[in-house]
Image: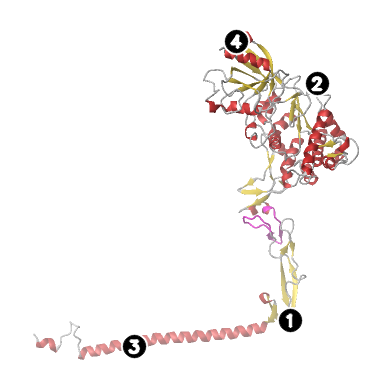
Amino acid sequence: MASRESMMAKLLGLILLSCMYHQSAMGRFVVEKNSLTVTSPESIKGNHDSAIGNFGIPQYGGSMAGTVDYPKENRKGCRKFDEFGISFKANPGSLPKFVLLDRGDCFFALKVWNAQNAGASAVLVADDMDEPLITMDRPEEDGSSSKYIENITIPSALITNNFGETLKKAIKNGDMVNINLDWRESVPHPDDRVEYELWTNSNDECGVKCDMLMDFVKNFKGAAQILEKGGYTLFTPHYITWYCPQAFTISKQCKSQCINHGRYCAPDPEQDFSTGYEGKDVVIENLRQLCVFKVANESQKAWIWWDYVTDFQIRCPMKEKKYNKECANGVIKSLGLDLKKIEKCMGDPNADLDNLVLKEEQDAQIGKGTRGDVTILPTLVVNNRQYRGKLEKGAVLKAICSGFEETTEPAVCLSDDVETNECLDNNGGCWHDKSANVTACKDTFRGRVCECPLVDGVQFKGDGYTSCVASGPGRCKINNGGCWHENRDGDSFTACLDNENGKCACPSGFKGDGVKSCEDIDECKEKKACQCQECSCKNTWGSYECTCSGDLLYIRDHDTCISKTAGKGKSSWTAMWMILLSLVMAGGGAYLVYKYRWRSYMDSEIRAIMAQYMPLDNQSGVVNHVSENHV
């Protein structure tokens, strides 16, 4: 069973949501439309309105012709069409197929997803009642819907019930119904500059929708900065806030979700007051990001907002418990922004006063002119028209570029193969080693990224923003691996260890962290050497020198002094014994040689004598008396 605090969080979230609608009561929600023209049959030719679906990819700036197909089964499109053996794939050379489906029984997005998988090029959904057109919104993402919402790539539109019945009747009569969908006027182009705004949020723990928003900002950053730097566009970020009803301002829930005494609020990120971050943490970071934009805009560098937002989401995520002021200030400093100006812009969140920055945001939520109220988060507005469709780089860039008159669009609208050259200015706020002239900044067509580099086969490792450390074999060749080093009196000392762990360790005779400093150890002062009574100690760079008083000799291994003469006497006796031992060994060897040779000589002499008087039987060359008697 849900806890009381969790239930209160959800209840207050609904109250805050109702307050949002109350704030915009004087405004209105505008349904963004595209033009639909029936080109055949002749009996139903004409122009009609259709409401652009808030998912998929509308063809902003273009048009599409096709033939309408109304399936005989699964007409609401809530099941897969292959279960019924139905395919909407167009034959080669024929017009694309636009599938007409009925409203009801399942999400709009699921209908479009099933039709797309069956080969449809676009989807028309016929309303099931007589009412003004509404926007087909995406459902709240859950485990099942998130698998298809982000993969819808075809356009879709809602048509009225009456127009839907007209199309169905023509198809039933056997007519080929051809229509043309036109988005060329969906985004107006009043001048040579496109103005657009993004209603966003700094909360990164709201599920699939937050992940989608963060991915879009990161991927679109490069194109946005090129358009802004070239003067082609005027971009403004916005953040939705709500106020707490007067009756609840002193409650625990409002105090945890609001700042400035309930004037500006955001729902608890986890919908649980007992854990994690609070709604007011989100409001404060939203305010900080607004002030980053204002301060950057004052210095004619409004595009830095994109760098701050992407760097903050990478360096300061909620899941790593880094979503805080300290981490945010680190990002601000790395981008060279004036921290004091930003803090002044933010004001005091505890004051019982209006915050001018956030008050402007609440006022801006109310629709003006052709733009309706902002009630969907995130929302993109291009030339005062709310964008409908997938929040994806290519689709959004196409919508923005459609805001230019044809043939006047900038080069970025025609090619993605561009670089932003952000690394030329302050290394893009990334890590930089001036002494080795190595930087983690890398330009891409999506904007600069901060990634530790690979230099001469040596990989640097780190976050790319505040630190990069050379790692692996050979790292000491590059600026001593970022470790301490010093040359003195012709000798070189370094704390770099050329191994895989990438650590810095002061060499023998030094102490310190090995990165910023290694201090010479004074072995004499710290009594680590020359401790004998007759010893005298003198410290040297990286080592020490010991001497003994009088006629004494210092022995380092034993840290002691001995007499020099004692050493000489001992050496003399040792030499004498060595000589005597050598003589004994030489004599013994000579005796063995003498004994061997003398014995061999005596044996040969005896054999010669015996051969003369007693010849051996096996000596065939000697005639004996036995052989003579047998001749």
Residue type beneath disc 4: Pro
**Amino acid beneath label 1:** Gly
Label 1, label 2: how many angstroms apart (C-alpha)? 103 Å
Q: Which residue is mark 2?
A: 369
Which residue is tagged 3? 599
Q: CA gap, disc 4 to disc 2?
A: 37 Å
Of labels 1 and 2, the one closer to you: 2
Front of the two marks 4 and 1: 4
Residue located beneath label 4 in the image: 41
Question: In the current view of this chain or complex, which residue is farthest to the right?
Answer: 352
Query: In terms of image quadrants, where is residue 311?
Result: top right
Start-end of magenta stretch: 481-504
Q: Using residue 314 as the reference point, say whether residue 22 is left or right of it.
A: right
Mark positioned earlier in the residue sequence (1 or 2)? 2
Residue located beneath label 1 in the image? 550
Q: Position of residue 625 (x, y in %)?
A: 13, 89
Q: CA distance from mark 3 to mark 2?
A: 133 Å
Q: Residue at x 80, y 45 (%)?
A: 325
